[in-house]
């Protein structure tokens, strides 16, 4: 690809990304989900922190977040149409966080608290429970990695830098889209593994099960998958500053946003039951700027 073609490709990609992002914001569906769920309490501790992310959509700008602990009455947390907030949770209790508007339930998420540590070394992080599960048996899997420059930092899943570094993969996921309909496969979600750094890059590895004998477009995204094929429009993932990196590069330039390169089409069968697709997060910037 020559320089002119490459620039035209970047311009087209950026315009497509902006169009998709705008579309996502126009058709927001109310949701609330929790990062690092279940919450794993450190040995000797009795409480921890869960990060909630919610969006009531354009029809619910004054949505409220409530919490029900065990079987007690619900407690008000905040009135905010969309946002991110840390909440303290106690070992031995169950939590249900609800997003509502005028006493109408929009969405909810249950959070469990445990002192059982995650699997050693791999630290498998799974996506929220999929719905619904079709009647097929996965024939194989796509494996690969998502990487990004350390200078970009990591998603601030809590105010503690080390917690954010330890959970740097939890905000990412890989999904499969049907090229014929552009609709996502809502069954087995990718599992993310924190991997060893590669020089100046943070790395997350993943595995994604797929059914056989059908072409899929494998894509990487951040945040919630409820808006697929559109990306999650939350600024925390697209434009806000991250932590732990170079302050001068912790967020995209003005007018830019975070995006991924590496999407591919994959077809698995019994002879070829494995495929590899790697992604890299980068800053998509307006044509007048320079990709970083």
Image: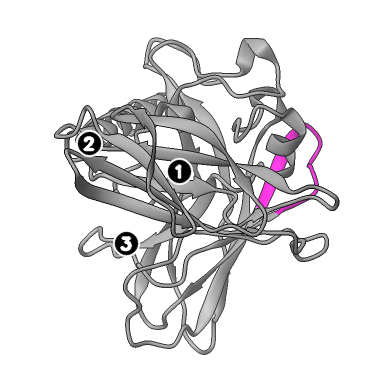
50 and 14: which one is in front?
50
Q: Secondary structure at mark 3?
A: loop
* Residue at the disc numbered 2: 57
User: Residue 262 location in percent, x, y?
Assistant: 50, 47
Q: Residue at x 14, y 34 (%)?
A: 59
Q: Residue at x 40, y 67 (%)?
A: 130
* Residue at the disc numbered 3: 184
The residue mark sitting in front, 3 or 1, is 1
Residues rendered magenta in the picture: 194-204
**Label 2: how many residues lie within 10 Å, few (<14), some (14-19) or many (20+)?**
some
Q: CA distance from mark 1 to mark 2?
A: 15 Å
Q: Specify how the rendered protein is coloured.
A: one colour
Task: State left or right for residue 27 relative to residue 232.
Answer: left
As for residue 233 lying within the magenta part, the answer is no
User: Residue 216 location in percent, x, y?
Assistant: 37, 66
Q: Please, is residue 286 above or below residue 125 in the view?
A: above
Q: Residue furthest front?
A: 72
> To which quarter of the image does residue 207 belong?
bottom right
Q: Earlier in the sequence, mark 3 or mark 1?
A: 3
Q: Secondary structure at mark 1?
A: loop
**Label 3: how many residues lie within 10 Å, few (<14), some (14-19) or many (20+)?**
many
Q: Secondary structure at mark 2?
A: loop
Split into 4 quadrants, where in the image is the C terminus? top right
187 and 210: which one is in front?
187
Q: Earlier in the sequence, mark 1 or mark 2?
A: 2
Q: Which mark identifies residue 223?
A: 1
Task: State left or right for residue 96 relative to residue 131.
Answer: right
Q: Residue at x 26, y 37 (%)?
A: 56
Q: Residue furthest right?
A: 44
Q: Please, is residue 290 above or below residue 20 in the view?
A: above
């Amino acid at each position: 690809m020559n320089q002119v073609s490459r620039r035209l490709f970047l311009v087209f990609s950026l315009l497509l990304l902006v169009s998709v992002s705008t579309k996502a914001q126009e058709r927001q569906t109310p949701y609330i989900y929790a990062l690092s769920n279940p919450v794993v309490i450190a040995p000797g501790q009795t409480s921890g922190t869960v990060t909630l992310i919610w969006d009531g959509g354009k029809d619910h700008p004054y949505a409220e977040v409530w919490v029900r602990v065990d079987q007690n009455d619900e407690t008000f947390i905040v009135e905010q149409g969309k946002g991110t907030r840390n909440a303290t949770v106690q070992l031995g209790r169950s939590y249900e966080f609800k997003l509502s508007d005028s006493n109408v339930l929009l969405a909810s998420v249950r959070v469990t608290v445990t002192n059982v540590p995650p699997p050693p070394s791999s630290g498998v992080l799974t996506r929220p429970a999929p719905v619904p599960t079709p009647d097929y048996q996965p024939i194989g899997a796509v494996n690969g990695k998502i990487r990004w420059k350390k200078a970009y930092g990591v998603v601030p899943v809590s105010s503690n830098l080390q917690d954010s570094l330890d959970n740097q993969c939890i905000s990412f996921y890989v999904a499969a889209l049907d090229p014929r309909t552009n609709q996502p496969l809502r069954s087995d979600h990718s599992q993310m593994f924190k991997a060893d750094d590669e020089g100046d890059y943070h790395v997350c590895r993943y595995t994604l099960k797929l059914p056989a004998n059908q072409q899929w477009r494998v894509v990487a995204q951040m945040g919630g998958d409820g808006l697929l094929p559109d990306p999650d429009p939350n600024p925390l993932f697209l434009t806000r500053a991250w932590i732990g990196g170079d302050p001068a590069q912790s967020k995209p330039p003005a007018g830019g946003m975070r995006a991924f390169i590496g999407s591919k089409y994959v077809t698995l069968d019994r002879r070829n039951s494995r495929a590899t697709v790697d992604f890299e997060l980068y800053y998509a910037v307006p044509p007048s700027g320079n990709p970083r």
